[in-house]
Image (cartoon, rainbow, N blue to C red):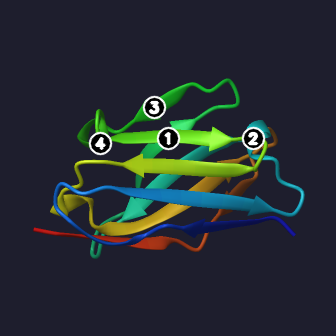
Amino acid sequence: QVQLVESGGGLVQAGGSLRLSCAASGSMFIANNVMAWYRQAPGSQRELVATITPGIITTYRDSVKGRFTISRDNTKNLLYLQMDNLRPEDTAVYYCNAVSIGLQMTWGQGTQVTVSS
């Protein structure tokens, strides 16, 4: 059974940093999937934050460009999201997502990020 497990969330003051991790288990190899981070704030729809392809092409939503960095470690089968200069509006549950070559989608359970002003 394929699973994605996020970690690294927490409470941080505005301007601070956090690094989220996403560990894949089962038969999933992160290197073979389009990996992404999404987030969902209370009362809001889930939104795409950043993506990374098997060819290591990255994309970001405009509001996090220059502050967030998505990366992966294929040897450890881990996905990361480095978040710097955090703002209160970054407060949300952050989810790891994988889309396989066959378009099968897998979600993690989410990790809470809270940024205080």
The answer to whether 110 appears left or right of 22 in the picture is left
Whichever of callouts 2 and 4 sits on the residue coming sooner in the sequence is 4
Tell me the SS state at disc 3: strand
* Residue under pointer 4: 64
The answer to whether 27 appears left or right of 44 in the picture is right
Neighbor class of circle 4 (other Cα within 10 Å; few <14, some 14-19, many 20+) is some
Q: Nearer the viewer, residue 84 or 29?
A: 84
Tell me the SS state at disc 2: loop
* Residue under pointer 1: 70
**Image marks 2 and 4: residues in contact by CB distance under 8 Å:** no
Give amino acid for label 3.
Thr
Q: Nearer the viewer, residue 68 or 61?
A: 68
Residue 114 lies, in percent from the top left, at 28, 72
Residue 92 lies, in percent from the top left, at 33, 68
Q: CA gap, disc 4 to disc 1? A: 11 Å
Q: Is residue 42 above or below residue 75?
A: below
Give amino acid for label 1.
Ile
* Residue under pointer 2: 74
Q: Nearer the viewer, mark 2 or mark 4?
A: 2
Give amino acid for label 4.
Val
Name the quadrant of the N terminus: bottom right
Q: Nearer the viewer, mark 3 or mark 1?
A: 1
The answer to whether 50 appears left or right of 16 in the picture is right
Q: CA gap, disc 3 to disc 4? A: 10 Å
Disc number placed over residue 59 in the picture, else none: 3
Q: CA gap, disc 3 to disc 1? A: 9 Å
Q: Nearer the viewer, residue 96 or 113?
A: 113
Give amino acid for label 2.
Asn
**Image marks 3 and 4: residues in contact by CB distance under 8 Å:** no
Neighbor class of circle 1 (other Cα within 10 Å; few <14, some 14-19, many 20+) is many
Q: CA gap, disc 2 to disc 3? A: 19 Å
